Amino acid sequence: MSIDRGECRVVEGRDRTTVLIGHCFADDDLVRVRSGDLRALMSLPGAYSAVVVRDQQVGLASDASAQFPLYVSTSGGDVVFGSRAHAVAEQIGVRLDLGHLAAQIVYPLVPELLVSRTAFHGVRQLEPGAALRWSADGMSRMTATPLTAVADTTFDDCAEELRECLRIAVSARTSIDSKMSSDFSGGLDSTSLAFLAAPHNEAVPVVTYAQDGAPVDDDLRHAELCGRLDPRLKHHVVVGTGEHLPYQSWPSAAELPHPSYLAMGPTRLRVAAAASLGAMVHLVGEGGDLVLGAPLGYFVDLARHRDFATLWQRCSAWGRLRQRSPLALFRKSVALASTNRRQGLTGFVRQLERAHPESFVPSWEEHNITSWGVPLCDWLAPRAREALSRQLIAAAEDDDRMDACDRTTLVQLDFAGATQRAVRETGAAQGVEVHAPFLDSEVVRVCLSLPAWRRCDPTSPKPLLRKALAGVVPQAVFGRRTKGDYTVTSYQGLRRNLTALRKMLDEPVSAEIGLIEPVRVRRALERAARGLETAWAPLNQVLAVELWLRELTRGDADV
């Protein structure tokens, strides 16, 4: 067992030991009472993973976004687990999983490849909300936190439960010894958290970020408006300079490759402002967009479940919003619904072999209305394509009963958890605990208990949050209909650091191990430098992997 002691709490019981990794806001006595049942243990307030040891039996349970991940290896017949993937890999011999690294770049919506596997061969991550138990009788998997819809859940009941979960999530983080602050982006999520925090504090510093030369005026105007609605909210605007743009000041030792580390400048500045105002706990809205909305793969699920009336209504609404033909969206959804797992994954494999024009960026409907995703780029080297194809074909044989929306949600939850890890580490470096209440396991469970098509509405952003916090958060907070777009800062940051990025891609380690075709990636970089439409997700992932590999290969990892 290898557990990071940074955010670790040990609760000793009469016949078992419980290790909580993360933020659990229940007292030790309640933890002892719940520790005999992993599902009951994981329903306490907070975001945390757990290890329960009793005699010759061990149980592991992951939080609902794997923000505090647990990794397991069963290589050689022994079970090795821990909270650091590299530490587990060192126990069995560090070898890279080329197929997983390739999957992170082209992004098939297959949790078995993107979530369960890691960058290290033979090291698996426990999926969000999952549990694992083993003893002398063998190993079994189970659910610790349900992350799928509950058939008889009503919208009103879900909203009422969410209201209580968010109230507990915020109040539990309030301490008379620790001043609390909050992001205040102008969006619904962080703004709502700030208003929930206000009754528990005499004053709550709230921080809005603006980039010099590229301010998002809608965000600033709405943040300033909302900041005047409660005198306990003390609004501060911090202005980022060129030093806070993406693609610079990246960390030297990220646990696993993740693109969020490329753009931590705004977070550093916001947390620094919070620290200077005396805050020790800072709230962020990370995860809100995910749990309060839904991937549009639910179009495919509506077709598969033959709810054509609802499907047509949603196709019409999204068609108007995105200027697309509702009939084309409807037909695409019905066609995808008739595609089984084997057909979908073998189709993805065939698409991997296709060359794209340099200007290729998946269309909105290709990227969003999908069961298994489409390759986001054609930059993989032959060796990586072969490794990923083998994994996809093997996964095609698995039994799959998950809806398309649930698969995508699981992948996105894992991504959100990794993003929050980067944010949390950035805050810790400045002595501030950064918390994301929307990623608390009970908050995630409650939101996802409502069917996807009822969680989101193209004509009314985040209806579940509006209903849940009506009368608690001023109605003016929910009056906004736009969402800030920060893409321009990606272009600015890339141009500012173009020399360093070019040098990184001149002789990339990722090409040496057979992961990418560097010429194609360099062309994509130059297109972005010229301000042309760019496939940002795969480009950022390639850069994140390259930085991570450079640090890792100092220890001579094998492929």
Image (cartoon, rainbow, N blue to C red):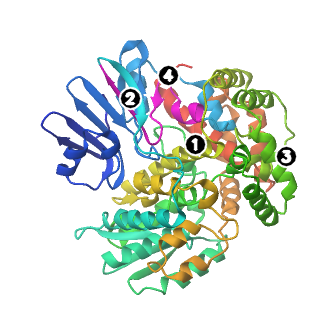
Query: Closer to the camera: disc 4 or disc 3?
Result: 3
Say whether disc 4 or disc 2 marks the residue closer to the N-terminus: 2
**Residue 80 drawn above or below residue 486:** above
In the rendered view, does 355 fall on the left or right side of 551?
right
> Extreme top residue here?
76
* Few, some or many residues within 10 Å of mark 4 (<14, 14–19, 20+): few
Say whether disc 1 or disc 2 marks the residue closer to the N-terminus: 2
Q: What residue type is labelled 2?
A: Ala
Say whether disc 1 or disc 4 marks the residue closer to the N-terminus: 1
Q: Which amino acid does label 4 sit on?
A: Asp
Residue 6 in view of the camera: no
Query: Closer to the camera: disc 1 or disc 3?
Result: 1
* Few, some or many residues within 10 Å of mark 2 (<14, 14–19, 20+): many
Q: Position of residue 301 (x, y in %)?
A: 68, 46
Q: In which quarter of the image is residue 373?
A: top right
User: Which labelled disc corresponds to residue 359?
Assistant: 3
**Residue 74 drawn above or below residue 347:** above
Mark pair 4, 2: CA separation: 15 Å
Mark pair 1, 2: CA separation: 24 Å
The answer to which of 3 and 381 lies nearer the viewer is 3
Say whether disc 1 or disc 3 marks the residue closer to the N-terminus: 3
The answer to which of 339 and 386 lies nearer the viewer is 339
Which secondary structure, mark 1? helix
User: Which labelled disc corresponds to residue 87?
Assistant: 2
> What residue did someone put label 4 on?
556
Which secondary structure, mark 2? helix
Say whether disc 3 or disc 2 marks the residue closer to the N-terminus: 2
